Image (cartoon, rainbow, N blue to C red):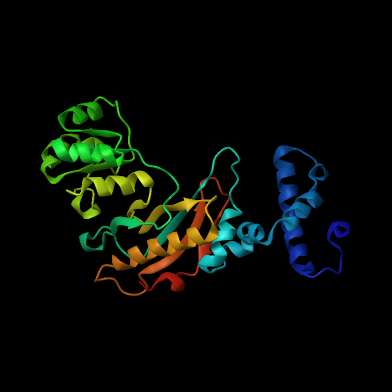
Amino acid sequence: LSAVFGENQSGGEERGREMSKIAALTAQFSRVLRTPAVAVNTASIFARFYAAKPAARLATSKRNQNQLVSVSAAIPAVKGLAKSKKFTESVDISVHLNVDPRKADQIVRGRAELPHGTGKKAVVAVFARDDKAKEALEAGATFVGAEDLVQKIQDGEVTFDRCIATPDMMPVVSRVARILGPRGLMPNPKMGTVTTDVGKLVAKEVAGSQVLFRVEKAGIIHAPVGRVDASDNALEENVRAFMKTLNTMRPKSIKDPYIKAVTLSTTMGSGSVMIDPTELRSS
């Protein structure tokens, strides 16, 4: 190992500690797998690790995964976590809020408009009739209908990512509430998915420029903010736009800090990057 890194290189103490941990783990695995510890090329593992780009090391180092960084530093770091070569991974944001979702006045949910979109086009279903149905089709909706669309949903013939309805169609939509509700697809006025401006909303949904979010029982919100092939500036602007929307939805009964923690991760990434929440707490 000393031949790989050199005994007098900077950061030698830190590397020594890391090598001791790997050596201990190697010995432990060798006992479990009944494989000689010398069969594991520990030196090559460290060589690849320290030869990685600084951004990748920031993301993969256990020591740095608990380190708070700025948004601009977090973007290239989280991109370094992406592993898949078969598809383009999404970049997801997780926000831990200081709320209790069991209380009605502390349920945080809504939609955020991302200036550069999520990079993924959505399949949209619309409950509408006559002119509104035509407007939805022209805007790019995949499924449009009324009672016929209800029947297709009940029969499991259609799948979609977003569901929109005009106000007059809600009695019809209620017939499939038990199917759409658990999937988070039930049109809701508070989420903006019950509207008369069908064409405009469908166009935004199809383009993937809007994301829906709802706080979970643990007080955490998850949402996509783009893909790893987007530019760093585009992802940063999406993150800031999402957090700005989240700040405007702060319940009045909540005391500081409203935002407790913010992390970024990728679909198949091996870890996450923690962002300094103080940078994103102002609206």
Q: Residue furthest right?
A: 3
Tell me the residue at 60%/45% (across/down).
83
Q: Position of residue 81 (x, y in %)?
A: 59, 52
Q: Position of residue 169 (x, y in %)?
A: 13, 40
Tell me the residue at 45%/69% (across/down).
277
Tell me the residue at 64%/57% (across/down).
56
Front-most of residues 256 and 193:
193
Label tally: 0
**Residue 262 shows in this picture:** yes
Front-most of residues 275 and 244:
244
188 vs 247: above or below: above
Dividing the image into 4 quarters, which one contains the C terminus? Answer: bottom left
231 vs 136: above or below: below
Image quadrant assignment for residue 4? bottom right
**Residue 98 shows in this picture:** no
Q: Position of residue 35 (x, y in %)?
A: 77, 38
143 vs 194: above or below: above
Front-most of residues 175 and 122:
122
Judged left or right of residue 199, residue 90 is right
Judged left or right of residue 38, residue 220 is left
Tell me the residue at 87%/66% (across/down).
7
Judged left or right of residue 118, residue 46 is right
Q: Position of residue 116 (x, y in %)?
A: 43, 55
Judged left or right of residue 182, residue 92 is right
Dividing the image into 4 quarters, which one contains the N terminus? Answer: bottom right
Image quadrant assignment for residue 162? top left
